[in-house]
């Protein structure tokens, strides 16, 4: 049973129009499909340079599930990584902007979080540049399956 993972239901006069899920692994999505005969519209998952679950991204895309990435800065841990700092200097951007741009360039709906107005603005200023292929490859290579949020692999 998937009760430990979040399932959001949007209701309109008693009719479920769509569901979104959070932190679902492929086996969770398969179990949901088996139990409910429904495909969620969105799977919201931790996604940052240290946690790039490409197999899950590909699975979601192949089933028209939007892969939405949260924690794109790895709770600040990516901001001090030498690769990110080097790219930030190269592009004249902040490390946060590099991480967000990379995530968007990988086709991920990206959710940066901040309570500071200047950082919110900074996080939005990522559409005036594009990382070259070598920069994207450098960040893609940082994947080490490190969670900074919550690891859903313990949910059966």
Image (tube, rainbow, N blue to C red):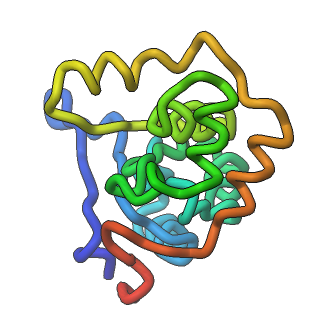
Q: Is residue 38 visible?
A: no
Indicate left or right for 8 with 109 as reference. Answer: left
Q: What residue appears at the point 44 percent right and 66 percent down from the top-left corner?
A: 24
Q: Where residue 148 appears, x then y in whole percent?
A: 36, 68
Say if 23 sits above or below 147 in the image.
above
- Quadrant of the drawing holding the N terminus: bottom left
Q: What residue appears at the point 39 percent right and 25 percent down from the top-left corner?
A: 123
Q: Nearer the viewer, residue 89 or 140?
A: 89
- Quadrant of the drawing holding the C terminus: bottom left
Say if 4 sits above or below 62 in the image.
below
Tell which residue pokes out farthest to the right in this image. Answer: 134
> Dividing the picture into quarters, in which one does residue 119 lie?
top left
Q: What residue appears at the point 59 percent right and 22 percent down from the top-left corner?
A: 92
Q: Where residue 105 appears, x then y in whole percent?
A: 67, 33
Q: Nearer the viewer, residue 126 or 61?
A: 126
Q: Is residue 98 visible?
A: yes
Q: Nearer the viewer, residue 89 or 69?
A: 89
Indicate left or right for 14 with 80 as reference. Answer: left
> Dividing the picture into quarters, in which one does residue 152 lie?
bottom left
> Dividing the picture into quarters, in which one does residue 82 lie?
bottom right
Q: What residue appears at the point 32 percent right and 76 percent down from the top-left corner?
A: 2
Q: Where residue 51 appears, x then y in whole percent?
A: 54, 64
Indicate left or right for 31 with 2 as reference. Answer: right
Q: Where residue 29 appears, x then y in whole percent?
A: 50, 66
């Amino acid at each position: 049973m998937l009760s430990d993972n979040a399932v959001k239901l949007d209701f309109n006069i008693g009719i479920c129009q769509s569901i979104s899920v959070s932190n679902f692994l492929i086996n969770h999505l398969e179990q949901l499909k088996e139990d409910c005969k429904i495909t969620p519209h969105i799977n919201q998952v931790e996604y940052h340079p240290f946690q790039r679950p490409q197999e899950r991204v590909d699975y979601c895309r192949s089933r028209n599930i939007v892969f939405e990435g949260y924690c794109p800065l790895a709770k600040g841990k990516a901001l001090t990584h030498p690769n990110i700092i080097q790219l930030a200097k190269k592009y004249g951007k902040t490390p946060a902007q590099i991480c967000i741009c990379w995530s968007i360039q990988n086709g991920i709906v990206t959710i940066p979080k901040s309570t500071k107005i200047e950082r919110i603005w900074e996080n939005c200023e990522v559409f005036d540049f594009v990382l070259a292929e070598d920069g994207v490859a450098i960040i893609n290579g940082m994947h080490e399956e490190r969670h900074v949020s919550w690891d859903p692999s313990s949910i059966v």
